[in-house]
Image (cartoon, rainbow, N blue to C red):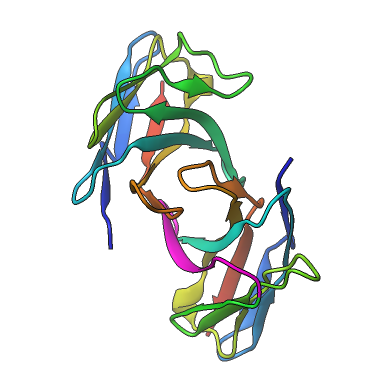
Amino acid sequence: GAVVSQHPSRVICKSGTSVKIECRSLDFQATTMFWYRQFPKQSLMLMATSNEGSKATYEQGVEKDKFLINHASLTLSTLTVTSAHPEDSSFYICSANGQSSTEAFFGQGTRLTVV
Amino acid sequence: GNSVTQMEGPVTLSEEAFLTINCTYTATGYPSLFWYVQYPGEGLQLLLKATKADDKGSNKGFEATYRKETTSFHLEKGSVQVSDSAVYFCALSDLPHSTLTFGKGTMLLVSP
């Protein structure tokens, strides 16, 4: 099956710094990628939809200036958490859809801890 | 709008017990339905899917049948194993490339 690689799997950063998370589709081209946030023991909350070559579409309540998304190619989307605060600590997961599929393929997730 | 409702957990079973996790949905069109599994500290993996009414998705002993008349997609397994302990998410998607709508997830704990 299709593989989506997310990196890093874990990151610890200091308050006020920025962290970049990468999401790559390894063996297919992803026209659309999605970024989710998951709080402990809760479901996935969609943050934004990222389309190659265009601006991301953010869900209501998600700060676009804080969570910068760049989908520069058909195989790479990045999420940058800017000026991170402890409340940004969470599990972030990306997913990618193939060009002709309703199926979403998920990355392994990134555990962000802001201290 | 679309929504997915699944039974709250945790579901606690002994090994070899029968599993059912209920999932019902509301959607404006004819969605595709999915079950995803999340093991601790990992992302989601597709477990099975069904794209039209009466389709049965199956994988690793798990099954779910797309029931349009009851708008349900219940997950079943005849004999669970300790390694099945995970969180299971029911989800739907009503268009290619569209977003998934997830249920809240159901934690399954299987003891030896």
Say whether residue B43 is magenta: yes
Quick one: quadrant of the N terminus of chain A? bottom left
Q: Position of residue A108 (x, y in %)?
A: 34, 48
Quick one: quadrant of the C terminus of chain A? top left
In this rendering, the answer to whether A113 lies above or below A64 is below
Nearer to me, A80 or B14: A80
The residue depicted at 38 percent of the width and 8 percent of the height is: A16
Asked whether residue B42 is in view, the answer is no
Q: Position of residue B8 (x, y in %)?
A: 74, 60
Number of marks in the image?
0
The residue depicted at 38 percent of the width and 28 percent of the height is: A51
Q: State which region is magenta.
A: B39-53
Asked whether residue A96 is in view, the answer is yes
In this rendering, the answer to whether A55 lies above or below B72 is above
Write down the quadrant of residue B19 in the picture.
Answer: bottom right
Nearer to me, A33 or A45: A33
Q: Position of residue A101 (x, y in %)?
A: 40, 53
Q: Position of residue A79 (x, y in %)?
A: 35, 24
